[in-house]
Structure formats: structure tokens, C-alpha cells
């Protein structure tokens, strides 16, 4: 039986002390001091203002010294096609449809718009997924159950809704670029939900590197022109609320 899946995003690893690492990269460019001395000096002082200055002046290559690795599951192959368009400062490992067989059923994602149509629509969608699974299994049989050989061609009948999982590593420069494009209201709902979740996980680790990351309208004018959603003020208020909530959670945890 095909089975409905929900998005799950885990922050697996990140560069230790990402803000200090980024600052070290930049201070090194402007200082005569040796690296040990610079490192000690950076650890002693809060780097927030310095990092903000770096980003404002566009000295962004130093952001490439810090990386974040995410485990992502419960997302569709439609999302996969979009996220893998990001080419720079990023690494992907994606579950294979050749080596992994779905003979016991595949996971699928249901769009909120279909869910909003009600229970009957959801059941119809589920039945369609089960129908596809039958087609898939029948092709596996006809292709002679040759393991990856039959999987690799039987998968051609699988839908965009089919669940996939992946490990994604991005450096901070690319993450900020990714958030800028994919947290915009004009981005597709699923990748936007993923980007929002990844951003929140990054914010919890490093408020300074990610405080203003997100759609371009948080930092200036909306670049979408006539197609702008017109929600710039709402987006900014939402960001303030998110920062306040995370701040409160941090204080409660201390
Ligand atoms: C709302 C939305 C709708 C979209 N619709 C479509 C669509 O209909 N069809 C479609 O095909 N794609 C679509 N895309 C994908 C989009 O065109 C990009 O491929 C995707 O967002 C990846 O971004 P990027 O090119 O900035 O890549 P990244 O890999 O994230 O690159 C980061 C930056 O590095 C630089 N860079 C990277 N590679 C090169 C290079 N080869 N040469 C010079 N500079 C480079 C660029 O400055 C680039 O912005 C859409 C994206 C969004 C957000």
C-alpha cells in the first residue's frame, strides 16, 4: 500500500562556532596578526556587529567557511527537481529509485490544495497512488524482478508525488541565497516550507548569520515588481515574531 508521508527536516551537523569561523576568515584579510592571536581575539569578543558589516559590504565569500548538513525526508520528487537546481556550495545524496525497490509500497506527498478539497478528494488521491503502485509492481514482475535492473525502468510510472529523502550540505553563502529565492511567497509551497524549516534550524544555531536571511523584501525592495505579493510588511512582522519566539525559547532553556 502506498503511504502518505510528512516532511521531516533534521539538522545533522554544522561547522562549530560558525560565526567565529566566518569572522576569522574576514579578520585575516584585514590584519597583520598571526592566526592564533586572531582566533583568541575573536573568541573574546561578540562578533555580531562585525558580521553584519561584512554582509552589508558584500564580503560574502567568508560565509563559505561554515556549512550546515540537513537530513530531509517526506518530500516529493517534485521538490527534488527544484532543490537540485542549486549548484554552488552544495552537496546532495539522494535515495536511489534503482537500488531501493518499492514492492511493499512507496511513500507519497499530498498537496495542501488537494487536502483542502476534503476527505473524498484525499481518498481519491490515495486510490490513485495505490493504482500507480500496482502498475509499478506489474512492471517489476514483467521486467523479471532483476533487482535494480527492473526498478530502474518500472520507476518510470511513478509520480512526482513519490517521497524521496536526502542529505543536503550547503555553505552559509548558498544557504542565504537559497532562502532568498525559496522563502519568497512566489516560491512553490513545498520547497518554501522546506526552506522555512531549514532557516529556523539555522537561526537556532546562528542568529547573526541568518537573522535577515529569507525573501529579499526583508532587506530591501521586493525584486518581483508587478508580480510582488505585496506582503513585505507582513513578512517583516513575521520575522520579528519568529526572532522573539526563538529568543524566548532560548531564555527558557537557560
Ligand atoms: C519562483 C521560482 C520559479 C522558478 N521557475 C523555474 C522555471 O519555470 N523553469 C526553470 O528551469 N527554473 C525555474 N526556477 C529555477 C531557477 O531558474 C534557478 O535554476 C534556481 O532557483 C537555482 O538558483 P541559482 O541559479 O541562483 O543557482 P545556485 O546554484 O544557487 O547559484 C548561486 C549563484 O551562483 C551564481 N552561478 C551559479 N552557477 C553559475 C554559472 N554557471 N554561471 C554564472 N553564475 C553562476 C549565480 O549568481 C547564482 O545565483 C525557478 C526558481 C524560483 C525561485
Image (tube, rainbow, N blue to C red):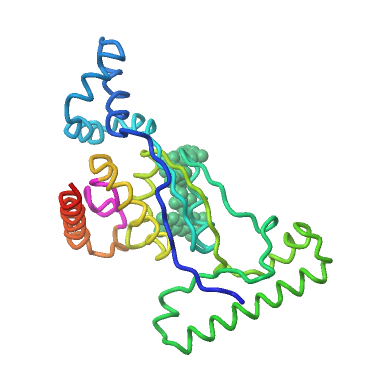
Q: Residue at x 32, y 28 (%)?
A: 21
- In the image, residue 194 sits, relative to residue 113, either above or below, namely above
Residue range in magenta is: 211-224
Q: Residue 130 lies in what quarter of the image?
A: bottom right
- In the image, residue 82 sits, relative to residue 47, either above or below, namely below
| Front-most of residues 186 and 49 | 49
Q: Residue at x 78, y 58 (%)?
A: 149
Asked if residue 164 is among those painted magenta in the image, a careful observer would answer no
Left or right position of 242 against 18 = left
| Front-most of residues 27 and 180 | 27
- In the image, residue 85 sits, relative to residue 65, either above or below, namely below
- In the image, residue 34 sits, relative to residue 232, either above or below, namely above
Left or right position of 52 against 201 = left
Q: Residue 117 lies in what quarter of the image?
A: bottom left
Q: Quadrant of the N terminus?
A: bottom right
User: Total marks drawn?
Assistant: 0
Where residue 186 appears, as percent x and y from the top left, is 36, 62
Left or right position of 203 against 93 = left
- State the predominant SS element of the stretch in magenta: loop
Q: Residue at x 24, y 19 (%)?
A: 40
Residue lying farthest to the bottom in this orientation: 120
Where residue 90 appears, as percent x and y from the top left, is 48, 41
Q: Residue 63 lies in what quarter of the image?
A: top left
Left or right position of 179 against 145 = left
Asked if residue 223 is among those painted magenta in the image, a careful observer would answer yes
Q: Residue at x 21, y 19 (%)?
A: 41
Where residue 160 appears, as percent x and y from the top left, is 57, 67
Where residue 42 appears, as percent x and y from the top left, is 22, 23
Amino acid at each position: 500500500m502506498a503511504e502518505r508521508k510528512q516532511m521531516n527536516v533534521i539538522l545533522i551537523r554544522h561547522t562549530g562556532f560558525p560565526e567565529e569561523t566566518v569572522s576569522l576568515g574576514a579578520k585575516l584579510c584585514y590584519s597583520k596578526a598571526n592566526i592564533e592571536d586572531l582566533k583568541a581575539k575573536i573568541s573574546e569578543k561578540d562578533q555580531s556587529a562585525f558580521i553584519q558589516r561584512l554582509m552589508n559590504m558584500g564580503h560574502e565569500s567568508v560565509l563559505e567557511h561554515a556549512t550546515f548538513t540537513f537530513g530531509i525526508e517526506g518530500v516529493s520528487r517534485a521538490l527534488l527537481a527544484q532543490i537540485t537546481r542549486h549548484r554552488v556550495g552544495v552537496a546532495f545524496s539522494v535515495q536511489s529509485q534503482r537500488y531501493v525497490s518499492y514492492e511493499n509500497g512507496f511513500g507519497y506527498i499530498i498537496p495542501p490544495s488537494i487536502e483542502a478539497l476534503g476527505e473524498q478528494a484525499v481518498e481519491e488521491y490515495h486510490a490513485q497512488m495505490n493504482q500507480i503502485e500496482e502498475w509499478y509492481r506489474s512492471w517489476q514482475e514483467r521486467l523479471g524482478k532483476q533487482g535494480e535492473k527492473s526498478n530502474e525502468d518500472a520507476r518510470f510510472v511513478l509520480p512526482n508525488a513519490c517521497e524521496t529523502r536526502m542529505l543536503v550540505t550547503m555553505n552559509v553563502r548558498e544557504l542565504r541565497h537559497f532562502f532568498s529565492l525559496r522563502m519568497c511567497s512566489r516560491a512553490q509551497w513545498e520547497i518554501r516550507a522546506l526552506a522555512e524549516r531549514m532557516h529556523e534550524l539555522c537561526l537556532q544555531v546562528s542568529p547573526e548569520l541568518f537573522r535577515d536571511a529569507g525573501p529579499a523584501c526583508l532587506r530591501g525592495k521586493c525584486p518581483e515588481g508587478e508580480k510582488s505579493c505585496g506582503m513585505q510588511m507582513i513578512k517583516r512582522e513575521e520575522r520579528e515574531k519568529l526572532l522573539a519566539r526563538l529568543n524566548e525559547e532560548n531564555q527558557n532553556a537557560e
